[in-house]
Image (cartoon, helix red, strand yellow):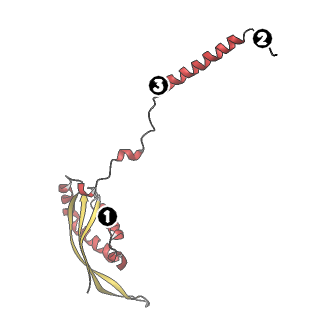
Amino acid sequence: MIRLVPTPGVGKLRGLAMWSRLGLLCLGAVLLAVGGCSGPAPFDFDALGLVTSREDLTEFSLGRYAIPIPIVVDSNSEQPKRSNRFQFDFELHALVEPGRESQIAEVWERHEGELRDQVIRVCRKASVAELQDPELGALKSHLADLVQAQLGEVEVKQVLITEVMSQEL
């Protein structure tokens, strides 16, 4: 039979250990209360707001275009022959925040000629495949970059291409 003999001073050590644990627990609670129990810090993109839907934007017409597209007829020769055999017709619109119509109208009035010339250049440099793409994704991307660069004073959210028609000449 094993007999436990109380050791002098051991009970006091257990009591001190219990109080030190309790003290650490209280200290941790105080630090949490002072530091806060907030969630993770917000991300930078939280401050950007939501993307505006197309229905919330206002259309501003950037004109109707009828652009003859040169097509390479003989690419094997040193001087490739080009021929206007394809015409690309469409209307171009800029989508802007509501209330910005007067701003874009002023900027459009100042830059209309240059912007129209550059739209024609972008379309003429595009491949026939890009112009015949049902979504016109690559062309819209190029035109959006161009329009935003020219009308930079007003933020253009998107470009919209409507009434698209292509025909052989």
Q: Residue 90: where, in percent of width, then height?
A: 24, 73
* Residues at marks 3 and 2, CA–CA distance in whole angstroms: 44 Å
Q: Residue 14: where, in percent of width, then height?
A: 67, 15
User: Which quadrant is the N terminus positioned in?
Assistant: top right
- Secondary structure at badge 2 equals loop
Vertical arrangement, residue 163 with respect to residue 84, above or below = above
| Along the line of sight, the residue nearer the viewer: 28 or 79 | 28
Instruction: Read off the residue under disc 1.
Output: 144
Residue 33 circle label: 3
Within 10 Å of disc 1 (Cα), the crowding (few <14, some 14-19, many 20+) is some
Q: Residue 33: where, in percent of width, then height?
A: 46, 25
Residue occupying the far top of the picture: 8
Residue occupying the far front of the picture: 1
In the image, what residue type sits under mark 2?
A: Val
Within 10 Å of disc 3 (Cα), the crowding (few <14, some 14-19, many 20+) is few
Identify the image quadrant of residue 65. Answer: bottom left
